[in-house]
Amino acid sequence: MASEPKNAIKPVASANAPAPGGHYSQGILANGLIYVSGQLPVAADGSHNVEASFETQVRIALDNMIAVIKAAGGSCDTLVCVTAYIAGVDNWPTFNRIYAEVLGDSRPARTVVPVPTLHYGYLVEVDAVALVRSDE
């Protein structure tokens, strides 16, 4: 059986993150990297709770991001970069604290973008790029 070419582009999906709500994939695997689409704090079963605290929303969004990375064979340790969109710059210190707790020793490149609003009225959305370990 022939192996996939190194430049193959393959969608990645995880049952531990919400299904896409539009015309996109949870993640795309290409050239040894997983590109994770923006993850809102939507429960894996697709249910919404926009009234959840900012802290709870951050944890859910990061869990969704990590679930997609793991589905591709990566981990927090293989994160290359993360972009976080947060409603209100005043939420930055709380985001930073929770992000550090969740990622532990992993310190990928990161951008935090304060925004006025996010879809459904959520307070945070994250996307990421991570290296996928290969046995090759």
Image: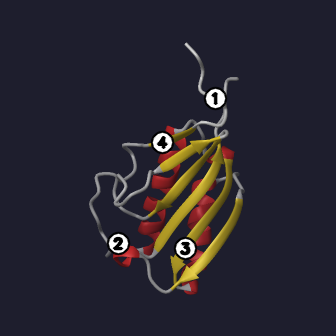
Q: Earlier in the sequence, mark 4 or mark 2?
A: 4
Q: Is residue 69 left or right of residue 55?
A: right
Q: Which mark is drawn over residue 5? A: 1
Q: Amino acid at mark 4?
A: Val
Q: Which residue: 36% across, 60% down?
A: 22
Q: Earlier in the sequence, mark 1 or mark 2?
A: 1
Q: Which residue: 58% across, 85% down?
A: 89
In this view, the residue in front, 117 or 90, is 117
Q: Is residue 129 left or right of residue 20?
A: right
Q: Which residue is mark 3?
A: 85
22 shown above or below 106: below
In the image, farthest residue toward the top: 1
6 shown above or below 135: below
In this view, the residue in front, 66 or 24, is 24
Q: Which mark is drawn over residue 12? A: 4
Q: Which mark is drawn over residue 19? A: none
Dot 4, how many residues are within 10 Å of its Cα: few (below 14), some (14-19), or many (20+)? some
Q: Earlier in the sequence, mark 3 or mark 2?
A: 2
Q: Amino acid at mark 2?
A: Ala
Q: Which residue is mark 2?
A: 52
